[in-house]
Amino acid sequence: MNAVATAATPSPMPPSTKTLRVVVKGRVQGVFFRDWTVQIARELGLNGWVRNRRDGSVEALFSGEPTAVDEMVERRCRVGPPAAVVTALSAFPSEDDPGQGFQRKPTV
């Protein structure tokens, strides 16, 4: 009976993945925001990308373990690197493919 119970017990689910597209506004260009984002995202094990936008904002796609994504968005990007002044941050669920690793993309 124990073998039957073991077979019927589902195996643990792999950690879920959370993907958010983020737009950060304020003094976020010319202050190493993108390079800082790449470094922190890689430290947190996230996939995705970051890029400047012509309107002066920074846009990023973060994908990975939900607590790591939340850490990046809520604790890191809301403050930014030392020279940045973040005045607004918008985050939206995304189904975009983040790819593997974390990279800096060209301005759009």
Image: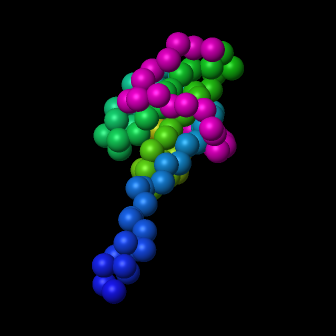
Colour style of the rendered protein structure: rainbow
The residue nearer to you, when weighing 64 against 59, is 64
Vertical relation: 46 (above or below) 57: below
Residue 14 lies, in percent from the top left, at: 41, 56
Q: Measuring from the top left, give residue 105's x and y in whole percent.
A: 50, 17
83 left or right, relative to 44: right
Residue 68 x %, y %: 42, 50
Question: Image point 38% across, 65% down: which residue?
Answer: 11
Q: Give the x, y percent position of residue 108.
A: 63, 14
Give the left or right position of residue 21, taking residue 37 as reference: right
* Res 38 quadrant in image: top left
Magenta stretch contains residue 103: yes
Vertical relation: 70 (above or below) 98: below
Give the quarter of the figure containing the N terminus.
Answer: bottom left
**What residue is drawn where x is 42% and y is 56%?**
15
Q: Which residues are magenta?
A: 83-108
Image quadrant assignment for residue 2: bottom left
- Of residue 42 and residue 87, the one placed in the foreground of this image is 42
Q: Is residue 81 visible?
A: no
Residue beneath the point at 35% across and 44% down: 44
Residue 25 visible within the image: yes
